[in-house]
Image (tube, rainbow, N blue to C red):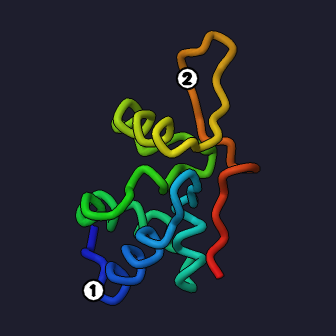
Amino acid sequence: MPQPNEDFVGAVLEVVASIPEGRVMSYGDVAAAIGSRAARGVGQVMAYYGSDVPWWRVVRASGHPPQCHEGRALEFYRAEGTPLVWSRDGHVFRVDLARARHAPD
């Protein structure tokens, strides 16, 4: 997969850095905020460069946290008061997008 260009990387990281505590955006939301449809490109940027921004605030379209980072993300969600929805058995969670979705200006 080709590497995203530096302008795209910078734009993605800028949007993610601006997401307030307790709020989230989906990968597609971040892409749309920079005038793109490249949700997968956003995911790639987050995978390679996202450790210095609040990566847990970027979720899948379902509201589920980044794959393989659920436990660490949950710590951040609890600390920030991010609205969550739990499965009936209480083992699986997702972010309540209806309450937590951030729409940048």
Q: Quadrant of the N terminus?
A: bottom left
- State the CA–CA distance, disc 1 to disc 2: 36 Å
Residue farthest toward the top in the current orientation of the protein: 89
Asked whether 102 or 87 is in front, the reply is 102
Residue farthest toward the right in the current orientation of the protein: 98
Question: Which residue in the structure is indicated by mark 2?
Answer: 92
Q: Position of residue 54 (x, y in %)?
A: 38, 58
Q: Position of residue 57 (x, y in %)?
A: 48, 54
Q: Position of residue 99 (x, y in %)?
A: 73, 49
On residue 33, which mark appears? none
Asked whether 40 or 49 is in front, the reply is 49
Q: Amino acid at mark 1?
A: Glu
Question: Which residue in the structure is indicated by mark 1?
Answer: 6
Q: Position of residue 85 (x, y in %)?
A: 67, 31
Q: Amino acid at mark 2?
A: Val
Residue at 40% over, 34% down: 75
Residue at 65% over, 20% down: 87
Residue at 51% over, 66% down: 19
Q: Report whether 70 appears left or right of 64.
A: left
Count of picture labels: 2
